[in-house]
Image: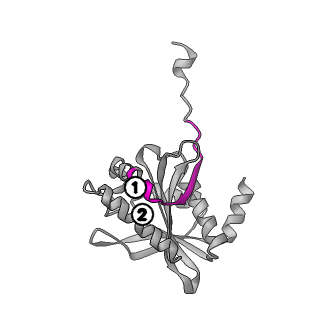
């Protein structure tokens, strides 16, 4: 056996970038959701085998309306080099009176474990603090969703406790682990560079 046969093949470096959803992203979104049902379905009730292109188009139209009214900001996550869709990240449930919002994210199943969610979430958080003037971003994660909990921890979000009936999964209210980020947390990111 040669040395080349036992060396692990390095994964190509992927530089995720976020941008607002566009109508021509519907096909890629539909395909990404369909390919990622095993990792999305337990946490996102809309991610079912019945998810079709019309639902992807409706979601993108909704995101456009929310952005135009400055109510919510949802982004596709794309590979900067190839333009391939890698996932989604967004700031939703905006509370203007307290300058806060919730952060949500997901990554295409085949691309998980590469730091994409963390990088995309950081971009969305920067947008929230720098552009929207938010003072607090909350991340609520069902305790069994270990991948999302790891993302929150890698972001340096502070765990604040458990929210009873924090979110609905299907028709069931479930508890969530609540994490938060504030603008001062970005200074920690810069120090870690």
Q: Name the residue carrying label 1.
A: 26
Query: Which residue: 60% across, 46% down?
Result: 15
Image-based side of 122 in relation to 107, left or right: right
Residue 22 visible in the snapshot: yes
Farthest front residue in view: 24
Farthest top residue in view: 1
Residue 107 at what x, y percent from top left? 46, 52
Residue 13 at what x, y percent from top left? 59, 39
Q: Which residues are magenta?
A: 12-27
Q: Are marks 2 and 1 in contact (CB under 8 Å)?
A: yes
Q: Residues within 10 Å of mark 1 (few under 14, many from 20)?
A: many
Residue 26 painted magenta: yes
Q: Residues within 10 Å of mark 2 (few under 14, many from 20)?
A: many
Residue 62 at what x, y percent from top left? 41, 69
- Under tag 2, what secondary structure? helix
Query: Which residue: 41% across, 47% down?
Result: 109
Q: CA distance from mark 2 to mark 1?
A: 7 Å
- Under tag 1, what secondary structure? helix
Query: Which residue: 41% across, 67% down?
Result: 61
Residue 161 visible in the snapshot: no
Q: Name the residue carrying label 2.
A: 60
Farthest bottom residue in view: 97
Residue 123 painted magenta: no
Colour setup of the view: one colour
Relative height, residue 146 to residue 8 (above, below): below
Q: Nearer the viewer, residue 168 or 126?
A: 126
Residue 71 at what x, y percent from top left? 50, 77
**Residue 57, numbered label:** none
């Amino acid at each position: 056996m040669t040395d080349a046969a036992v060396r692990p093949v390095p994964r190509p470096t992927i530089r995720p970038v976020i941008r607002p959803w566009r109508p021509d992203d519907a096909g890629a979104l539909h395909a990404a959701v369909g390919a990622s049902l095993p990792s999305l379905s337990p946490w996102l009730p809309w991610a079912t085998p019945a998810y079709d292109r019309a639902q992807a188009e409706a979601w993108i139209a909704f995101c456009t309306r929310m952005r135009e009214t400055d109510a919510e900001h949802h982004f596709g996550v794309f590979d900067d080099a190839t333009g391939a869709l890698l996932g989604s990240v967004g700031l939703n449930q905006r509370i203007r009176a307290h300058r806060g919002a919730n952060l949500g994210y997901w990554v295409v199943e085949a691309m998980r474990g590469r730091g994409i969610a963390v990088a995309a979430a950081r971009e969305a958080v920067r947008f929230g603090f720098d552009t929207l003037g938010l003072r607090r971003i909350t991340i609520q994660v069902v305790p069994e969703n270990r991948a999302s909990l790891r993302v929150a921890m890698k972001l340096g979000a502070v765990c604040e406790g458990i929210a009873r009936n924090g979110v609905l999964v299907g028709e069931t209210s479930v508890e969530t682990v609540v994490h938060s980020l504030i603008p001062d947390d970005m200074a920690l990111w810069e120090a870690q560079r």
